[in-house]
Image (cartoon, rainbow, N blue to C red):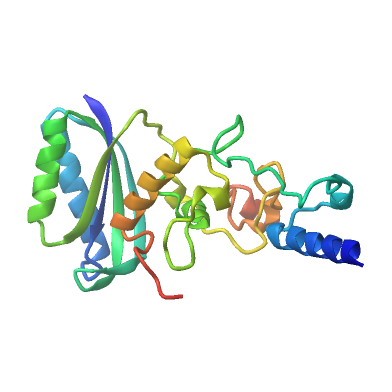
């Protein structure tokens, strides 16, 4: 009885961590021996085919900013630390040029 | 001599040709001081993310220049004095290309997304009107 209960809770935690819609069909197999499965996040700016961080590219920058206009932490977006620092300056430049809000209500 | 990007926002209540006048004025100023203007981009009238000097919109202009730092200081001083310019930002960049920046790209529509590898979306050539004006009238005949 207790066993089924623990597996049920483990499954619910996987669902909540995979909010980004990862297509994991065999998540159950990988869950053996682990409390829950977390997909490895890759930095969207490092790697051979990634784009540069540009303060003019509002469309890309807005993906790393919350709906209130604050920058999202890198442990949520998966940006590596050096790129996160670059991203921070880019967001600050875009804010200065009124391309991005300093804060927004919605 | 290094490369700089100077972006400035012009008040929305000036005439459109006056925006070009202002940008040529600064381009001439840079050229007078032995600088090179590599590109000039008019991003057009855009709405600001917040109010700047009571304005909700503004004309964005970007100058890509190659000049020394003292030229940039002088340009910034002139921009501070100008009443038409409500905001400016000049930054040094490592390299400059002739390609237009992302702001010059046409606004993307909702289902105008590329494939998973990040390639540009395939769009039918016929959907672009007057893509080749030389052949368009000939086809109509």
Taking A98 as reference, is B73 left or right? left
**Residue at point 83%, 45% (across, down):** A33
Q: Nearer the viewer, residue B24 or B3?
A: B3
- Assign the N terminus of chain B to one quadrant of the image: top left
Residue B89's place in the image compared with A49, above or below, is: below
**Residue at point 39%, 47% (across, down):** A88
**Residue at point 43%, 45% (across, down):** A87
Q: Position of residue B14 (x, y in %)?
A: 21, 67
Q: Nearer the viewer, residue B137 or B104?
A: B104
| Residue B133 in view here | no
Q: Nearer the viewer, residue A60 or A27?
A: A27
Residue A7's place in the image compared with A90, above or below, is: below
Taking A79 as reference, is B7 left or right? left
Q: Position of residue B18 (x, y in %)?
A: 20, 60
Taking B28 as reference, is B7 left or right? right
- Assign the C terminus of chain B to one quadrant of the image: bottom right
Q: How many marks?
A: 0
Q: Position of residue B50 (x, y in %)?
A: 31, 69
Quarter of the rendering containing residue A78:
top right
**Residue at point 84%, 51% (across, down):** A27
Quarter of the rendering containing residue B95:
top left
Residue A61's place in the image compared with A44, above or below, is: below
Q: Position of residue B122 (x, y in %)?
A: 70, 48
Q: Residue furthest front?
A: A2
Q: Residue furthest right?
A: A1
| Residue B57 in view here | yes
Q: Nearer the viewer, residue A23 or B107?
A: A23
Quarter of the rendering containing residue A99:
bottom left
Residue A91's place in the image compared with B14, above or below, is: above
């Amino acid at each position: 009885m207790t066993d089924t209960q623990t597996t049920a809770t483990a499954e619910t935690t996987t669902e909540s961590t995979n909010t980004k819609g990862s297509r994991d069909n065999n998540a159950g197999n990988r869950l053996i021996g682990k409390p829950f499965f977390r997909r490895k996040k890759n930095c969207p700016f490092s790697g051979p085919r990634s784009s540069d961080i540009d303060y003019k590219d509002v469309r890309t920058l807005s993906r790393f900013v919350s709906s209130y206009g604050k920058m999202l932490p890198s442990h949520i977006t998966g940006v590596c630390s050096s790129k996160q620092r670059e991203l921070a300056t880019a967001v600050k430049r875009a804010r200065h040029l009124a391309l991005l809000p300093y804060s927004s209500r919605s | 001599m290094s490369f700089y990007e100077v972006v400035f926002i012009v008040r929305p209540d000036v005439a459109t040709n006056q925006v070009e006048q202002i940008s040529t004025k600064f381009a001439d100023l840079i050229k007078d001081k032995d600088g090179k203007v590599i590109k000039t981009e008019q991003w057009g009238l855009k709405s600001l993310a917040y109010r700047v000097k009571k304005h909700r919109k503004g004309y964005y202009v970007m100058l890509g220049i190659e000049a020394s730092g003292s030229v940039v200081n002088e340009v910034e001083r002139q921009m501070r004095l100008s009443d038409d310019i409500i905001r400016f930002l000049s930054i040094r960049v490592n390299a400059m290309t002739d390609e237009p920046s992302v702001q010059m790209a046409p606004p993307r529509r909702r289902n105008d997304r590329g494939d998973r590898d990040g390639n540009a979306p395939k769009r039918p050539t016929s959907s672009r009107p007057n893509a080749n004006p030389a052949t368009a009238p000939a086809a109509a005949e």
